[in-house]
Image (spheres, grey):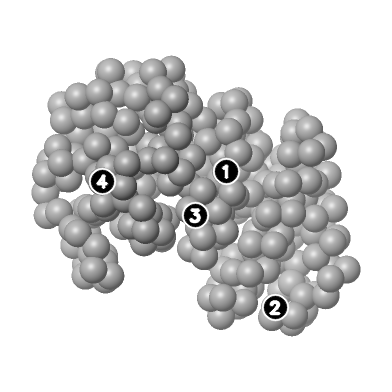
Amino acid sequence: MADVKKKLGIIGFGNMGSAIALGARVLFEVSVFDKDKQKLADSSGLKTETLLADLVSKADVVLLAVKPQDFDTLLNEIKPLIRGKLVISIAAGITTGYIEKILAGARVIRVMPNMAVKISASATGLVKGRQVTDEDLDFARELFNILGKVWPVEEEMIDSLTAISGSGPAYIFYDIEINKLDPLNVPINRKNEYVKRLKQAAVDLGFDSRMALELAVTTTASSVQLLIQTGNSPLELRKMITSAGGTTEAALKVLMGNGSWSEAAQAAKKRAQELSKRE
């Protein structure tokens, strides 16, 4: 069991950072920083730091939740402050090796949660870096188990996982949207069809049948639950996870051209690889 006094510092208070912070405070002492102070205005009683250096120096574990385009600047800024701390990154496409190279001596875990982290039902992949200890892994598992289901994966499979659990909800939202289904009452046979399609897409990307099914079931169930719990429309939720030039956009272009979910997932994986910063 993780130490309840463990101090978790989260850099970035956007959609993912804020969802993780709100979930994590159940077990950990959480403080947050964002260079956009307006975002922190709605920090829901969480402890906030006005200086990045203060957050990093006080934290036992530092979680990086900034956009990939801001990542290099952030790494170089915190580099002198890390001193062998555990660093958890949720940045898409940035490998543990790349982070370790800049933050020499840091212990790095890379995680890929999905949008359902907002309702503590995320499908999350976890990759351990070279210096990570068993205690570090236990901490990361405990943190993300609060927020959903966790699968340890090898780093070479993380882009495939992103294409299924990360972009997969958008495939579901798009299908509900174009078929004008009731988002609050998706028929059971349609949900089963989503599981079938996602499982096949996952198998085609190299997952074994068991894990492909687990990913498909979790991603489908949490996507449907998001519609119910948030009250957002399928279009609104789809737009939330579709960044310009990102993996989900690449997949949706395939779907909008009448491609299969497997083809869409292949396009998402390819785009993730193109965006990747490797060692």
Secondary structure category for the residue under label 4 = loop
Q: Which mark is residue 5?
A: 4
Q: CA distance from mark 4 to mark 1?
A: 23 Å
* In the foreground, 82 or 47: 47
Please tell me which residue is depicted at 27% across the width and 43% down the height of the picture.
6
Q: Is residue 9 above or below residue 172?
A: above
- Residue type, numbered disc 4: Lys
Give the amino acid at mark 2: Pro
Task: Report how far apart the C-alphas of labels 3 and 1 lie in the structure.
Answer: 9 Å
Query: Mark 3 packing: few (<14 Cα in 10 Å), some, or many (20+)?
Result: many
Q: Disc number at residue 147?
A: 3
Q: Tag 1's secondary structure?
A: strand
Callout 2–callout 1 Cβ contact below 8 Å: no
Residue 272 position, x and y percent, is 57, 38
Place residue 85 in its image quadrant. top left
Residue 274, horizontal then vertical, whole percent: 55, 33
Please tell me which residue is depicted at 32% across the width and 31% down the height of the picture.
Answer: 86
Measured Cα–Cα span from mark 4 to mark 3: 19 Å
Classify the position of the C terminus by image quarter.
top left
Q: Secondary structure at mark 2?
A: loop
Q: Earlier in the sequence, mark 2 or mark 1?
A: 1
**Mark 4 or 1, nearer chain start:** 4
> What is the spatial separation of the Cα atoms under label 3 and label 2, in whole angstroms?
23 Å
Residue identified by numbered label 2: 183
Q: Is tag 4's residue or tag 3's residue first in the polypeptide sequence?
A: 4
Q: Looking at this view, is 56 or 251 the one in front?
A: 56
Q: Position of residue 266 (x, y in %)?
A: 72, 40
